[in-house]
Amino acid sequence: MDKVVGILGGGQLGRMLAQAASLLNVNVVILDVGDHAPAKQVVSPRSADLAHINGSFTDPAKIRELAAKVDVLTVEIEHVDVGVLQSVEGSVPLGVHPSPTTIRVIQDKLVQKQHLAAHGCPVSTFVQVDSNAASVTSIAEQLGLPLMLKSRTLAYDGRGNYVLRTLTDIPEAIAALGGRPLYAEKWVPFVKEIAVMVVRSASGEVASYPVVETIHKDNVCHLVFAPLRSNDAMLAKRAREVAEASVKTLEGAGVFGVELFLMENGLIFVNEIAPRPHNSGHYTIEACETSQYENHLRAILSLPLGSTALKVPSAAMVNVLGASNNMDEVTAVARHALTIPGAAVHLYGKSECRKGRKMGHITVVAPSDAERSRRIRPLLERLPSPSD
Ligand code: ATP
Ligand code: MG
Ligand code: MG
């Protein structure tokens, strides 16, 4: 297993990938700005030629430098230069995963929706829109209000989304989305957001993790509950089938996070797919037989996939977001978690705390849902909260 994995991006996902890699004697080389990116802090290179690279993961020269010293290239973020990845693909022994063509489809959310619709995956109504008032007005009249306006590119944590509630807000919406290419989605009155992590091996074998419920706050993942509880005995099976079928339409190995909307009548829509480990899969580190991070590495290195089964009756994950530049508030909730049985603290080693920034997460495992609720409650009460 003495292989070298290159990762574009050195944030928390890269950090948890690197932690999983170290257990398998897999070497990791990180490309990101600065010598102390979160992922770089947890792996010390085995030899000088495997030193991390200081540079932007969007810099073609740096991507080529990384490609030249690894057995496989992967990403912790989809906002990367696909053309450069395609140009190095043939020279990296085990290739680039997920495949650059997959990243290209996913990084433009309109193209992603068109791709899913063309492959028969259930998506709600969406339409391309021009970044001008006339175009947005005509789409709003067609699809109704509220209307979800989305930036096609560079979106994350809801930055790139604008909920249009009245036609008078259109100029503000266009200004807020900053002249980026846009599309619009009909408002989806979901009853729950759910998610499924799917892992796909290099040979095309696909396996899914248990269905989880995700709760967002201000467009950012706040809580994840595993497994999903429902009166509908077939729901979990259906959600996994939709997620697996969606991933099968894409090329390349690795894990994919599939975000789904659950409707009152039981229908499921695909919201979006992340071609990498995902926030809704952090819980797998403590709660599943093989974490999403280890399975991502196994998949891209052509190793046998590990079991995706839950190994605890109940789990929850809470994201710890900064409320200000005060790191002490983050440390305080983490310290409290140390007193709770079944709680595992993950702090990301970010150099600066900022309002809304993901600083860490805490996973709680428990013998029952009731006990899980009891264990997580004091943490929710202590989360940093913005004063304004
Ligand atoms: P991520 O950080 O997950 O990549 P993102 O910036 O790509 O987020 P989306 O996942 O598209 O954003 O949307 C963020 C949230 O906004 C969703 O999780 C959901 O709560 C809400 N949302 C998105 N699309 C719709 C819609 N069409 N109707 C209603 N709510 C929506
Ligand atoms: Mg997204
Ligand atoms: Mg999303």
Image (tube, rainbow, N blue to C red):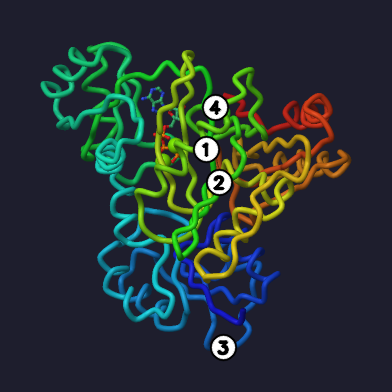
Disc 3 residue type (three-letter): Ala
Q: Residue furthest bottom?
A: 48
Percent position of residue 269, x then y: 40, 28
Q: Are marks 4 and 1 in contact (CB under 8 Å)?
A: no
Distance from Cα at disc 4 to Cα at disc 3: 43 Å
- Callout 4, which amino acid? Lys
Nearest to the observer: residue 126 or residue 45: 126
Q: CA distance from mark 1 to mark 2?
A: 6 Å
The tag on residue 208 is: 2
Q: Which residue is mark 3?
A: 48
Distance Cα–Cα, label 3 vs label 2: 38 Å
Q: For the point 32% across and 14% down, which residue is it?
A: 146
Q: Is residue 203 left or right of residue 365?
A: left
Would you place residue 223 above or below residue 112 in this image? above
157 on left or right of 368: left
Residue 229 on image: x %, y %:
66, 25
Q: Residue 85: x percent and y percent?
A: 32, 68
User: Foreground residue, 311 or 273?
Assistant: 311
Q: Identify which amino acid the numbered label 2 is placed on.
A: Ser
Quadrant hosting ligand 3: top left
Q: Which residue is mark 4?
A: 217
| Residue at x-position 21% and y-position 22% | 171
Q: Nearer the viewer, residue 158 or 123?
A: 123
Query: Which of the marked residues, 3 or 2, is nearer the chain's N terminus?
Result: 3
N-term-proximal mark, 1 vs 2? 2
Q: Are marks 1 and 2 in contact (CB under 8 Å)?
A: yes
Any mark on residue 240, and which?
1
Query: Which quadrant: the N terminus?
Result: bottom right
Mark 4 and mark 1 lie on one chain; the one further toward the N terminus is: 4
